[in-house]
Image (cartoon, grey):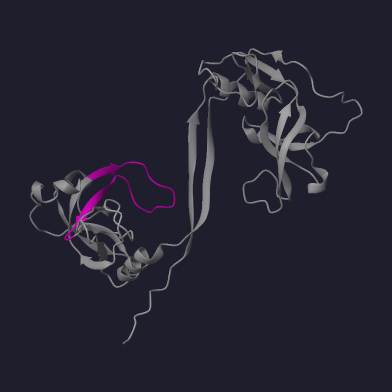
Amino acid sequence: MSVTPPPEVLRAPLVVEFPFTRSLGPVQSAFLTGLRERTVLGVRAEGGRVLVPPVEYDPETAAALRDLVEVGTTGTVTTWAWNPEPRRGQPLATPFAWVLVRLDGADTALLHALDAPGPEAVRTGLRVRVRWAGERSGAITDIACFEPYDSAADTGPATDARDHDGAFEDPVTGIVAPARLDYTYSPGRAQTRYLHALAERRTVGERCPSCAKVYVPPRGACPTCGVATTDRVEVGPRGTVTTFCIVNIKAKNLDIEVPYVYAHIALDGAGLALHGRIAGIPYDQVRMGLRVEPVWSEDGRYPDHYRPCGEPDADYDTYKELL
């Protein structure tokens, strides 16, 4: 008796990256504008504690907070962890410590980097001070890092904070922060077989032995019944548009002109709709029930998009359960 060996488990490095844009309320605007002006602001909570970095609502009472105070640029390390291999985009290119620093006049700690020659130079209780960036724009990176502060003139933590009106010229009203996640993706048994089948221009799902739904892409288990799915079922290649949206924002590094249509497509024989781009038809003519077929990528490894196949539109009753 021969035994078919399991398919090779695939792995691939992936990167998810996008700019995160947010507007700022009066508290965060004052905090970031203050950093640009080499001033650190906190906010006074209802119970009298000074919170740095400032928050817009009291973490205990949920009351709106607006009473800004200026705190010191020196402080004390409350806890730390050594980072021996800095990654791209981190504050320093050489090994450093992540530290929580309670600035003088504050009751909470601020997370940032500490420039130190090694972990033996870092300790809880270490006195540190802000090292300002040479060019500042109104961001947390205006604090380049913290550095040990051993000045003989340092008499220890201050006991109070000074009220501040938060008024600056040309205040910062919004920020754009790059978000990036690097990871290695392993699709597992079910999706590895699915990807191998796509390389042969076939779409293969797995059927639940309990409810008989065919999942594409397969998940290895039925999310409804909670049982393993092992029976492989070839579906499609044609399918039906169940729902769709018109995309009007051009994605970075994606060579597709806007507007274009992204849709849920129920392949024939599948019990779950998958995602796909619709092309070969004006975007304003795409509709629910449109019958489509795949157009494979140049290397033939996956459907690049779906196009109308010329069949009459599907009756609503045939796909309403897949919406």
User: Residue 115 location in percent, x, y?
Assistant: 77, 42
Quadrant housing the N terminus: bottom left
Judge whether residue 131 can be spotted in this image: no
Q: Is residue 84 left or right of residue 67?
A: right
Does residue 42 appear to the left or right of 266 in the view shown? right
Image quarter of residue 30? top right
Q: Position of residue 62 (x, y in %)?
A: 50, 19
Q: Which of 2 and 306 is in front in this view?
A: 2
258 is within the stretch colored magenta: yes
Which residue in the rendered view is the most extreme toward the bottom?
Answer: 1
Whether residue 19 is in magenta: the answer is: no
Classify the position of the C terminus by image quarter. Answer: top left
Q: Residue at 65% of width from left, 36% of height from top?
A: 141
What residue lies at 18% left-to-right and 57% top-to-bottom?
239
Q: Which of 86 and 173 is in front in this view?
A: 86
> Residue 52: x and y, percent?
65, 25
Farthest residue toward the right?
A: 152
- Residue 209 visible in rendering: yes
Position above or below: 200 against 173: below
Q: In this view, does 174 lie above or below 224?
A: above
Q: Which of 310 and 87 is in front in this view?
A: 87
Question: Where residue 32 appears, x then y in whole percent?
Answer: 61, 27
Q: Give the range drawn in magenta.
A: 244-269
Q: Which residue is drawn at 33% across and 58% down?
A: 219
Q: Is residue 233 left or right of residue 220?
A: left
Q: Quadrant of residue 196 in the image?
A: bottom left
